[in-house]
């Protein structure tokens, strides 16, 4: 695996990176899973700021300050809900990663941490999502030499194993 791309198990809200990626919902006003954890850890200032953004469509991304997080920024992206794969889910998930990396480049960010976008309550099959994540991370690292570190952060060891398997297979 590329030393600039790592799979880690941990709490994304504790990472000292330029930006953490939030697997948000379209309202950007917080929710469950990683979204709720990021909102809780960042503090009420994040919610107040997100209220000014007018939401975020699936596949797109928005950047905010990190507020009380160790990360300087939060890149919010809205992954697709899995409906069987024939409603553009792979293209929308790919767009999530591309739009996050576009914002990272525009803002001169050198380190990013991603959760497993859409793999929780949105029901995206973990192996398929991991293949997309790996492909997009590798492409972004190839295209942006200023990007020093990309972490794929799994909440538990079983998701980390899926990500490592995708890394080994590609």
Image: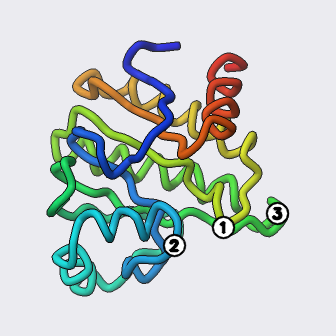
Q: In the image, 100: left or right of 130?
A: left
Closest to the camera, between mark 3 and mark 2, is 2
Residue drawn at (17%, 47%), measured in percent from left and top?
Answer: 107
Disc 2 is placed on an element classified as loop
Dot placed on the residue nearer the N-terminal end, 1 or 2: 2
What is the CA distance from the residue labelled 1 to the residue labelled 2?
Answer: 8 Å
Relative image position of residue 84 (x, y in whole percent): 84, 63
| Numbered label attached to residue 16 | none
Query: Which residue lies under the disc numbered 1?
Result: 121
Closest to the camera, between mark 3 and mark 1, is 1
Query: Which residue lies under the disc numbered 2?
Result: 32
Q: Is 88 located above or below residue 27 in the figure?
A: above
Query: Which residue lies under the disc numbered 3?
Result: 86
The answer to whether mark 1 and mark 2 are in CB contact below 8 A is yes
Q: How crowded is mark 1: few (under 14 residues within 10 Å), some or many (20 or more)?
A: few
What is the CA distance from the residue labelled 3 to the residue labelled 2?
Answer: 26 Å
Dot placed on the residue nearer the N-terminal end, 3 or 2: 2
Would you identify the image quadrant in which residue 89 lies? Answer: bottom right
- Residue toward you, 98 or 32: 32
Q: Residues within 10 Å of mark 2 (few under 14, many from 20)?
A: some
Relative image position of residue 121 (x, y in whole percent): 66, 67
């Amino acid at each position: 695996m590329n030393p600039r791309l790592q799979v880690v198990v941990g709490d994304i809200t504790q990472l000292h990176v330029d930006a953490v990626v939030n697997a948000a919902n379209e309202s950007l006003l917080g929710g469950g899973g990683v979204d709720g954890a990021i909102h809780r850890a960042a503090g009420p200032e994040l919610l107040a700021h997100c209220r000014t953004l007018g939401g975020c469509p699936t596949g797109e991304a928005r950047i905010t300050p990190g507020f009380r997080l160790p990360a300087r920024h939060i890149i919010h992206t809205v992954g697709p809900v899995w409906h069987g794969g024939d409603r553009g889910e792979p293209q929308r998930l790919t767009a999530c990663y591309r739009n996050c990396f576009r914002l990272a480049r525009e803002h001169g960010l050198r380190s990013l941490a991603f959760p497993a976008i859409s793999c929780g309550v949105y029901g995206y099959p973990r192996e398929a999502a991991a293949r997309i994540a790996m492909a997009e991370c590798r492409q972004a690292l190839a295209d942006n030499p200023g990007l020093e570190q990309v972490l794929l952060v799994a909440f538990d060891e079983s998701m980390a194993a899926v990500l490592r398997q995708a890394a080994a297979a590609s």
